[in-house]
Amino acid sequence: MYVDYEFVDWTFDDKNYNITSIMFESRTRLLTVNCMAVFMYEKKRISRKTFQAVTSCNLIFDGGVVVDNNCCTNDPNIYAAVVDNNCCTNDPNIYAAGTLSKYSRRYYAEHMKQCYFNRTEIGNTLGRYILNKLMRSSSPVEDDDLFSNCNREGKRLVPRYTQPLSVSARLPGKINYMSVKKPGVESPLHVAMTADDYGQVLTSGDCKNIDEQGYFRLHLNQYNTVETITCLTTKELEKVNLTHLWGKHEKLLNNLVTRFEMVTIGDLFAFFAEPWSYALYHDRFDKLSTDINDILRLVTEEEGTSILEDVISKLEMNRWKRLTPAQFHDQHNKFNGSEYQKTPLRLTPAQFHDQHNKFNGSEYQKKVTEKVLEFLIDNYNYLPMYANPMAVNVILAGHEVSPMFNNT
């Protein structure tokens, strides 16, 4: 181990596409080490050249380029966002991008630094700000987020980013690695796993023997929603498809927990490659989920028939408190075998069972069913594996005269 050395340079072999040696220096010595690969764990820092470029433009620097909740610097012509670490400053209308941005201290948002969130989502947000700036005559871009008013005059809320963080790499030995996790400041794993609300972990395969079967780790939070995905395999990863699993409830994943407990899932890679899951990977599925949520939030004119109002009234009756484990196990015996025992809500088993019965056969269920069928019919060319009325009619066309359905 070499202490008090700093990285200087490396020697790269263009033919074999690998690093052959690396150079370090201390105050008194220059050190060259031959190697086959290099793994860097040093925290990213801002170089002297970048610092000089920022300060020479009279921008405020406080461990990063200081921005407001619109990604604006103290210069109205300069924007900064976490997208890349290349920053141009030689043009009067500059849009700087890099991990060097930081919210002003007046927002008290150290935990909301953009380096903790999805850079593509931040780039899209920055694009909307720039679009509104360049096209003032056009109507502003609408945002359905609850915090969309944070950018109004006088507001001091920073934008909220919700998309997951995805990291993938090809490791030595032709091993493919991918990790998908929730955005925000990350807690150490050993600390997070000790929390009562950590949830549960489903795994398949073995890290020590990934040649035969890849390693797949799925972490479900206390609401049975996918919070972390970790994959390690020698096969090619369907990165885009697997990323779509993040944020989905286990019931939406074909009753994942029930099937896993029944030991019917031996390989999570194979399970999520089955035809039932293809709708989850469709680029319009998120729009379908949003439409269904809008339907369930609708308030009916007839009092007592609205799901939203009914759930809120039950939660208020319970004073928004969750049942203790003892209360939970004591009460759920009356509904043993129901879905409640795997759904840790703030409703009692009786309230949950009552709410479930109200939904069955209601107008809400009819509209949700219509919306799902509309989605499947509109995308039948991409999702032919799902049954829908149109597909069934095609299959049964002419069945009256078919010998398969003729008793004679």
Image (cartoon, helix red, strand yellow):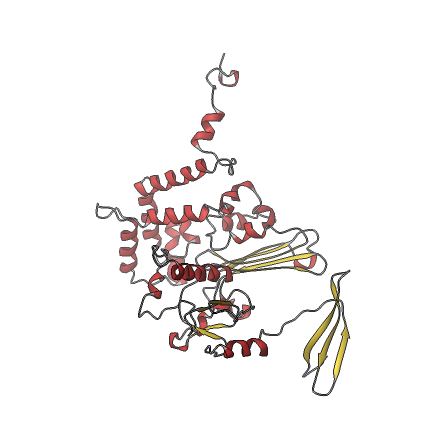
In percent of width and height, residue 264 lies at: 57, 46
Residue positioned 44% across, 35% down in the render: 377
Residue positioned 45% across, 33% down in the render: 388
227 lies above or below 404: below
Q: From the viewer's perspective, is 319 left or right of 202?
A: left
Residue positioned 45% across, 60% down in the render: 127
In percent of width and height, residue 155 lies at: 32, 69
Is there any visible trace of residue 338 in the rendered image?
no
In percent of width and height, residue 81 lies at: 48, 67
Residue positioned 35% across, 65% down in the render: 151
Is there any visible trace of residue 3 in the rendered image?
yes
Q: From the viewer's perspective, is 2 left or right of 140?
A: right
Q: From the viewer's perspective, is 396 left or right of 138?
A: right
Q: Quadrant of the N terminus?
A: bottom right
The quarter of the displayed image where residue 110 is located: bottom left
In percent of width and height, residue 17 lies at: 74, 61
